[in-house]
Amino acid sequence: MDLVEAIKARKSIRGYHVDPVPQEILREILEVAVRAPSADNSQPWEITVITGKILKDIAEANMEALNSGRPIAPDVTHKPYEGIYRKRQTEVGKKIFELMDIPREDQGKRTAWISRGFRFFDAPAAFILAADESLDPTRAASDIGGIAQTICLVAQKYGLGTCIASQGVLYADIVKQFTKIPKTKKIYWCITIGYPDWDFPANQVKTDREPLQVNTTWLGFNE
Ligand SMILES: Cc1cc2nc3c(=O)[nH]c(=O)nc-3n(C[C@H](O)[C@H](O)[C@H](O)COP(=O)(O)O)c2cc1C
């Protein structure tokens, strides 16, 4: 697949076939993805790849915590979006809810959809992305973002779909309990991965991007 085609084709996949992803393929993806740049070549990413029983156990423990009303406790937090950012966030949600036939007022269906994220969208495998707590979190987040996108792009070579997701790791202590990721590591996000179920309605979502003039300034041209 051509690079530009791969970038354009990548999208978040939230419905997967149950087929497992061979470990060798996951390894090959990571071998390439670690070529991602990082600040001062610090390579802060610490990647835990989960599948099978451990993934199921974490998903179940997440669901239990969620259903009991336990507040989420992620290692990395962010401010709520406001203004245009909030608008863009709401638009994605609206599109997905429309595709999934989840009416605004149907609290049951909305909760079921949210739970799905905490179950890693029932993907057969996931990468947990962490970095040492001693690192500057802004730099680490930027570097982890770079490798995350690279993983998602390379995965397509194998017919795999991905979704970078906070939801699966919002109870960071649960993930650490099962994976034995030390407390001294901050979990940033996970990436769910598997063979896309193209009949799953949310996979049809096409998110918008602003035209370049909204967020690009050109200086020094046509002088
Ligand atoms: C850091 C990060 C965290 C994300 N967390 C979630 C998540 O918890 N649940 C989810 O459904 N999508 C999540 N996403 C996916 C975004 O919603 C998605 O990338 C965005 O809407 C653009 O859509 P696209 O990936 O299909 O182009 C996350 C993406 C990033 C980069």
Image (spheres, rainbow, N blue to C red):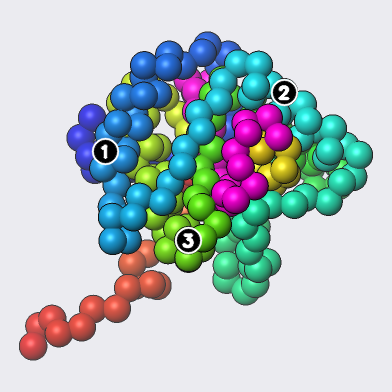
User: What residue does disc 1 label?
Assistant: 5
Q: Residue placed at 84% from the left, 32% from the top? A: 64
Q: What secondary structure is found at the residue carrying circle 2?
A: helix
Q: State which tag comes first along the sequence, 2 or 3.
A: 2
Which circle marks residue 57 in the picture? 2
> Could you classify mark 3 by the number of other residues whose Cα lies within 10 Å: few (under 14), some (14-19), or many (20 or more)?
some
Tell me how far mark 2 sits from mark 3, CA to CA: 30 Å
Q: Residue placed at 36% from the left, 19% from the top? A: 25
Would you place residue 53 above or below residue 28 in this image?
Answer: above
Q: Nearer the viewer, residue 214 or 13?
A: 13
> Could you classify mark 1 by the number of other residues whose Cα lies within 10 Å: few (under 14), some (14-19), or many (20 or more)?
few
Q: Residue furthest right?
A: 68
Which circle marks residue 135 in the picture? 3
Q: Indicate the position of residue 174 as horizontal and vertical percent values.
A: 73, 37
Q: Is residue 174 magenta?
A: no
Give the residue type that dot 1 points to: Glu
Q: What secondary structure is found at the residue carrying circle 1?
A: helix
| Magenta segment | 177-202
Q: Residue placed at 57% from the left, 49% from the top? A: 185
Q: Is residue 197 magenta?
A: yes
Q: Quadrant of residue 17?
A: top right
Tell me how far mark 1 sits from mark 3, CA to CA: 34 Å
User: Which one is in front in this view, the residue at disc 1 or the one at disc 3?
Assistant: 3
Does residue 162 appear left or right of residue 220 in this picture? right
Q: State which tag comes first along the sequence, 1 or 3.
A: 1
> Could you classify mark 2 by the number of other residues whose Cα lies within 10 Å: few (under 14), some (14-19), or many (20 or more)?
some
User: Which one is in front in this view, the residue at disc 2 or the one at disc 1?
Assistant: 2
